[in-house]
């Protein structure tokens, strides 16, 4: 899974976010036939946005799609999705969420599972390292991002 096109894209997006000075969380939405529909990274800091988490950015960059485009899709994300991003995955009928890691933050994984969405945690060390460095360097942005 760590070599899947979606996970590779999500990590690339997280690194782009870090280079921009933002929260290094990336995501990619991949169709059931393996095509990247959208990819993005957390843009709250860069855009002054209240909602552009990585998953929301990937959905935004996918553009307006028919509901059928989301069916059977996979959301790859470098960090466990918050309640907002969990809700978006449920709303659009994403079938699977592949998470880079959930030690830094544990989001709505149980709720995703209760709603019939497959959840896979890769426990990826690179994702953990990106977040640890960011929280060390910019703790105020991190706590703002998670609503604390």
Image: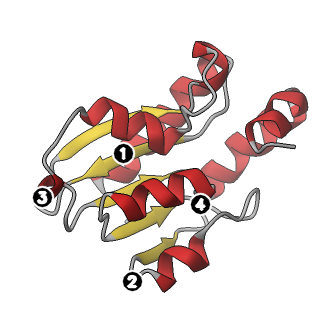
> Which type of secondary structure does the marked residue at label 4 adopt?
loop
Q: How is the image coloured?
A: secondary structure
Drawn side of residue 15 relative to residue 40, left or right: right
> Which type of secondary structure does the marked residue at label 1 adopt?
strand
Residue at the spot 53% in from the left edge and 68% down from the top edge? 122
Q: Which quarter of the image is occupied by the N terminus? A: bottom left
Drawn side of residue 145 relative to residue 135, left or right: left
Depth check: give the residue in front, 131 or 30: 30
Label 2: which residue? 116
In this rendering, is residue 70 above or below 21?
Answer: below
Residue 34 in percent (x, y) is at 16, 56
Q: How far is mark 1 from mark 2, CA to CA?
A: 20 Å
Which of discs 4 and 2 lies nearer the camera? The answer is 2
Label 1: which residue? 28
Which of discs 1 and 3 lies nearer the camera? The answer is 3
Label 4: which residue? 124
């Amino acid at each position: 899974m760590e070599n899947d096109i979606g996970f590779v894209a999500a990590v690339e997006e997280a690194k782009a976010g870090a280079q921009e000075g933002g929260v290094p969380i990336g995501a990619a939405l991949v169709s059931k036939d393996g095509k990247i529909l959208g990819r993005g990274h957390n843009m709250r800091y860069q855009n002054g946005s209240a909602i552009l988490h990585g998953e929301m950015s990937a959905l935004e960059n996918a553009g307006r799609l028919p509901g059928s485009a989301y069916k059977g899709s996979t959301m790859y994300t470098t960090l466990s999705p918050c309640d907002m991003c969990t809700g978006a995955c449920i709303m659009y009928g994403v079938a699977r969420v592949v998470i880079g890691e959930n030690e830094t933050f544990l989001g709505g994984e149980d709720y995703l599972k209760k709603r019939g969405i497959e959840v896979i945690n890769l426990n990826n060390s690179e994702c953990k390292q990106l977040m640890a460095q960011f929280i060390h360097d910019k703790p105020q942005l991190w706590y703002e991002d998670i609503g604390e």
